[in-house]
Image: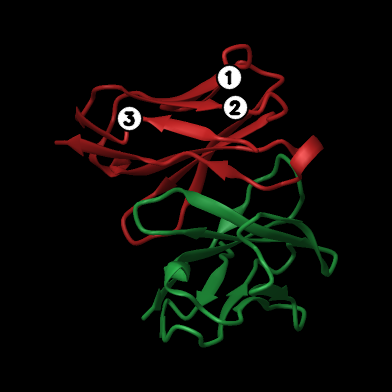
Chain colours: A red, B green
Amino acid sequence: GENVEQHPSTLSVQEGDSAVIKCTYSDSASNYFPWYKQELGKRPQLIIDIRSNVGEKKDQRIAVTLNKTAKHFSLHITETQPEDSAVYFCAASAPETTGNMLTFGGGTRLMVKP
Amino acid sequence: EPEVTQTPSHQVTQMGQEVILRCVPISNHLYFYWYRQILGQKVEFLVSFYNNEISEKSEIFDDQFSVERPDGSNFTLKIRSTKLEDSAMYFCASSDQGAYYEQYFGPGTRLTVT
């Protein structure tokens, strides 16, 4: 089955700096890659997703890049703010073969220091 | 904005007891999911449910687990005879469409088996 690895497990940055979180996946059939943010004590919420027919997607300060050949995808947050502090999860899905189930990475705790 | 709700927020039970975790998905959603996260580990897929039947299930979802949509609003996960290793945070999620669409997560139920 699919295996998703996520690095780093913790990341500390200064406010205003950029943050990059990387994930690799094993199943070449995976073609949908969402990113979830979970603030302390709250539910995971989707912040951005990408399908395999594109290599990059941006939404304001957040971008995701995908390299299907290397089977990795990354989350980029620019101009980080204290409210970006949270745990971020990447996930992968292969709807054509295994349906809608999401396989998650282990999470990255991002701390943005003011 | 509509949200997925889950009850209870925390459930403590003794080993061998049956528990039912309850979820109310977003009202017009058609796809329903259960995930769990053992403390310090990845979020793991358990089961997906569509059109009143299970669509996919993981190896974790053995005969001890069952799901039901007893009425038009609730979606439940039953664990027949709980084990210590069932202690985890259980997340319900729903989506209005299937593949490639956002799964909206509930806040989770923390299950503690003693």
Q: Is residue A27 above or below residue A39?
A: above
Give the image quarter of residue A94. top right
Secondary structure of the residue carrying numbered label 1: loop
The residue at which mark 1 appears reads as A71
For the image shown, how many numbered marks are present on the structure?
3
Give the image quarter of residue B73. bottom right
Instruction: Where is residue A102? Give x, y as percent.
Output: 62, 45
Residue visible at 73% across and 62% down in the picture: B29
Instruction: Where is residue B53? Give x, y as percent.
Output: 83, 67
From this viewpoint, is residue A100 visible? yes
Q: Earlier in the sequence, mark 1 or mark 2?
A: 2
Q: Is residue B20 above or below residue B34?
A: below
Query: Which circle marks residue A8 in the picture?
Result: 3
Q: Which numbered disc, 3 or 2, marks the residue closer to the eye?
A: 2
The residue at which mark 2 appears reads as A26
Secondary structure of the residue carrying numbered label 2: loop
- Subunit that carries the residue with mark 2: A
Look at label 3 and name its amino acid: Pro
Compute the Cα span from label 3 to label 2.
Answer: 18 Å
Marks 1 and 3 in Cβ contact (< 8 Å): no
Residue visible at 47% across and 39% down in the picture: A105
